[in-house]
Amino acid sequence: MNWLKRLGANIYFIVLIGLALLLFILGGVKVFG
């Protein structure tokens, strides 16, 4: 059960980083595009 909770936290963290990168890239395209 503990590893499952850790896996969920990792997935949540990865999703947050992915969204942040996506927003950063979209913002860069808007600024430079």
Image: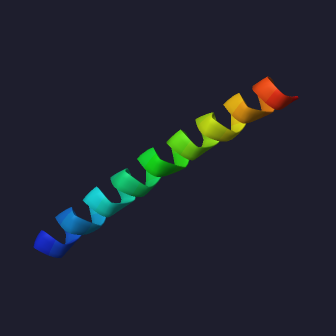
Judging depth in this view, the residue of 20 and 6 nearest the camera is 20
Q: Residue at 79% of width from left, 33% of height from top?
A: 29
The quarter of the rendered structure image containing the C terminus is top right
- Residue 10 horizontal/vertical position (percent): 32, 62
- At 78% from the left and 25% from the top, the residue drawn is 30
Determine if residue 18 is in view: yes
User: Please, which residue is most extreme toward the top here?
Assistant: 31
Answer yes or no: is residue 1 visible.
no
Residue 27: x, y in percent? 68, 29
Q: Pick the quarter of the image with the N terminus.
A: bottom left
Does residue 13 appear to the left or right of 15 in the view shown? left
* Residue 23 vertical position relative to residue 12 in the rendered view, above or below: above
**Which is nearer the eye, 22 or 28?**
28
Residue 32's image quarter?
A: top right
Q: Which image quadrant is residue 22 in? A: top right
| Residue lying at 53% horizontally and 42% vertically, measured from the top left | 19
